[in-house]
Image: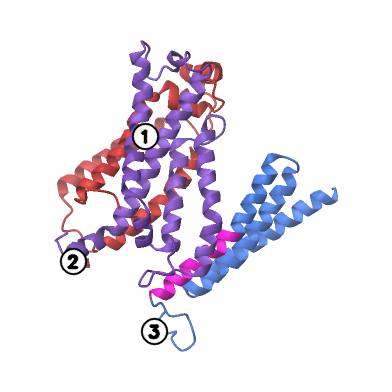
Chain colours: A purple, B red, C blue
Amino acid sequence: MSADDQPGLYVESTIIMTTVRVVSPFVLTFALFVMFHGADSPGGGFQGGVIAGATVMMLAFAYGIETTREWVDVRVIAALASGGVLTFAAIGLGAIALGGNFLQYNEYLFIYEEASKYGIELVELGIGAIVASVAIGLFLLAAGYGHVVDGEGGEA
Amino acid sequence: MGLTEAAVGAGIMTILFLLAMANTVRPDEARRFESVRLRTVVGVGAFVVVLGATIPSLPAIGDPTAPVVAGEVTQYYVANAYEETGVKNAVTAVLAAYRGFDTLGEAVVVFVAGVAALSVLRQEVFA
Amino acid sequence: MTPLEWAIVALAAVGAFFGGVAAVGIVRLPDIYTRAHAASKSDTLGAVLALAAVALAIQTDLSTIKAVFLLLFMFLTNPTAAHAIARAAEDQGIRPWAAENREGDP
């Protein structure tokens, strides 16, 4: 994604672009850390998801919202949001299908002995995917609303 | 949980509110209260009063005998969360195991919020 | 007190001083550019010094590394945020406070 060699695009200052380029990998790593490590330290899916979503917003601030909109794949966002819900529901309902209660992790003990811990991790990951994708989606939706209406020439 | 408030409250909400402000029109002074309905004001006011009336019965901040600390359920979580779930963070254990159904509802609420924003703004896809 | 403790107290005190200077600057300075100047320079220095005191006080722990990382990122991001705000203000056509346009832009 090179913003500067395409004419007519919003060009942000070099200072902001450089800082975001340096900082954003750390932020995304921290988001994944918070998400994965939520079982053993403060954190979890909601928090990590928001931080991951904020990474994309930071990119949008540095490189321009339109550039980011072209870079973000809509299908990935939709897949993450629905995939998160499906993951959570599948783990919860799978335990019922195996004869336990909703989210009763010890029904999965035949797969792996620490089923409870990794089941919780998976659930947190699903939550993180939902929160991150919805945060990115709402941001792009709100940022592009006037633009889309103007472009179509329709009424708001 | 404080991390959530920091990330959502300081990070995302500011941006979303600013974008909402940028994309909406502000009514002028004369028309500011035109769309406020008396019925809504009474309903919301009554709700605030009812909620406010419960404040005096809350336990003091940091009270060790408060029901939420001394209650049987909390004590059970503190005593058994690690053995039963294998997770060191009791908050995560409560969220994703003991009260998992509630958390599924929360996650679906976030999902539905995204879908609702799409349908209100009459968009097919995000972005 | 050991020299280390003296260093911790000195760092924290100087950090608090610069934080106070930044707060006074944000309240008292006249326009967005001068306020961004107070918020970026003084506040960053205050936060970085306070975090350095924290890193020294924790001594050898994983938390020291976290405090040092915080310090580095504070050093990177805080001035950049102030730069972005000032740039956006300039983009919006807000004129800097100066003697000749004091009446026009209070």
Front-lying residue, C22 or A107: A107
**Which percent across, then down, holds residue B104?**
35, 29
Q: Secondary structure at mark 1?
A: helix
In magenta stretch: residue C88: yes
Q: Position of residue C3 (x, y in %)?
A: 84, 51
Decide if residue A111 is on the left or right side of residue C77: left
In three-dimensional space, the C-alpha distance between marks 2 and 3, rounded to whole angstroms, equals 27 Å
Q: Nearer the viewer, residue C104 or A122?
A: A122
Q: Within the magenta stretch, is there residue A121? A: no
Q: Whole-percent x and y of residue B33?
A: 19, 58
The segment highlighted magenta reads C76-92
Residue matched to label 2: B30
Circles 2, 3 touching at the beta carbon (< 8 Å): no
Q: Which label belongs to residue C104? A: 3
From the image, which quarter does the N terminus of chain A lie in? bottom left
Q: Does dot 2 land on a helix, a strand or a loop?
A: helix
Question: Magenta residues: mostly which secondary structure?
Answer: helix
The residue that appears at 50% across and 74% down in the rendered structure is C33
Q: What residue type is disc 1 on?
A: Gly
Residue situated in front as seen by the camera: C34 or B65: C34
Mark 2 surroundings: few (<14), some (14-19) or many (≥20) residues within 10 A: few
Write down the chain letter for disc 1.
A
